[in-house]
Amino acid sequence: MMKSLFCLCMAVVFWSGYAFAGYVDNGDGTITDTGTSLMWEKSTGVTTYTWEQAKAYCENLTLGGKSDWRLPTRNELQSLVDYTSYNPSISTTYFPDTVTYQYWTSTPYALGSDRAWGVNFDHGVVYYLFKTNQNYVRAVRGGQCGGNPCPSMRVLGSDNPKLENLRTFRDSTLAQSAVGRKVIEIYYNNADSINKALDRSPALRATARRILEVIAPMVGKKQN
């Protein structure tokens, strides 16, 4: 029981709740991720952009009969990463022109207003970048986590500042090694079961919260 509980808690740490992707090509330049219900621009933007330009590109995009496109958040963009491959670390069947370089996200860097987060699709590593840098962009539309709360949010609550420590640990430590990427992949494949287990057992959710409250500051210190 304790071993299973530990595995559950660690799984919640590693990712915010995206199931491993299942894609549908809509035939109009867009791709739908059936796990998150997000719709993606199939092609990479036509050139590189600063952060402000990337936001404007997405907001002014009309594609697939839709005009409510936006720059993805860090978690949304990283949900496209396939940690079983590299160069590029994404499904080339559905996103064939992906560049093995950095793509912008809309998530600002908390410790500097002149920087924002990006995802590098060489190995799927997440970096903070100066907003004046020239990077690639892929627009998105729709919600997050298939419209459901993500596991870490179920446990800690969406407004808990310790969530950022856990995500930083995932992005800056786990994603940079083959073993870490495998752990993330395993969680992707079991995210739905983890969500159901948390929903079925308030006691399990409460215990997981106590453990994560201890783990979050520890992994946060590790990054400093």
Image (cartoon, rainbow, N blue to C red):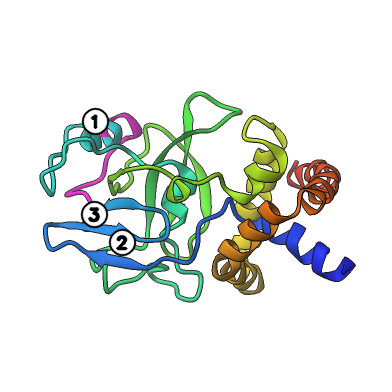
Q: Which residues lie in the magenta part?
A: 45-53
Local packing at callout 2 (Cα closer than 10 Å; few below 14, some 14-19, many 20+) is some
Label 2 secondary element: loop
Q: Does the image show residue 95?
A: no
The quadrant of the rendering that contains the N terminus is bottom right
Residue for badge 1: 56
Of labels 1 and 2, the one closer to you:
1
Please give the name of the residue rendered at 33% of the width and 45% of the height, measured from the top-left corner.
135
Coordinates of residue 191 in the picture (x, y in percent): 58, 62
Of labels 3 and 2, the one closer to you:
3
Task: Specify which label sits upstream in the sequence, 3 or 2.
Answer: 3
Whether 157 is drawn above or below 3: the answer is above
Amino acid tagged 1: Ala
Task: Specify which label sits upstream in the sequence, 1 or 2.
Answer: 1
Amino acid tagged 2: Val
The majority secondary structure of the magenta stretch comes to loop
Residue for badge 3: 44
Label 1 secondary element: helix
Please give the name of the residue rendered at 83% of the width and 46% of the height, measured from the top-left corner.
218
Residue 183 painted magenta: no
Amino acid tagged 3: Thr
Please give the name of the residue rendered at 60% of the width and 68% of the height, measured from the top-left corner.
190
Left or right of 125, for residue 120: left
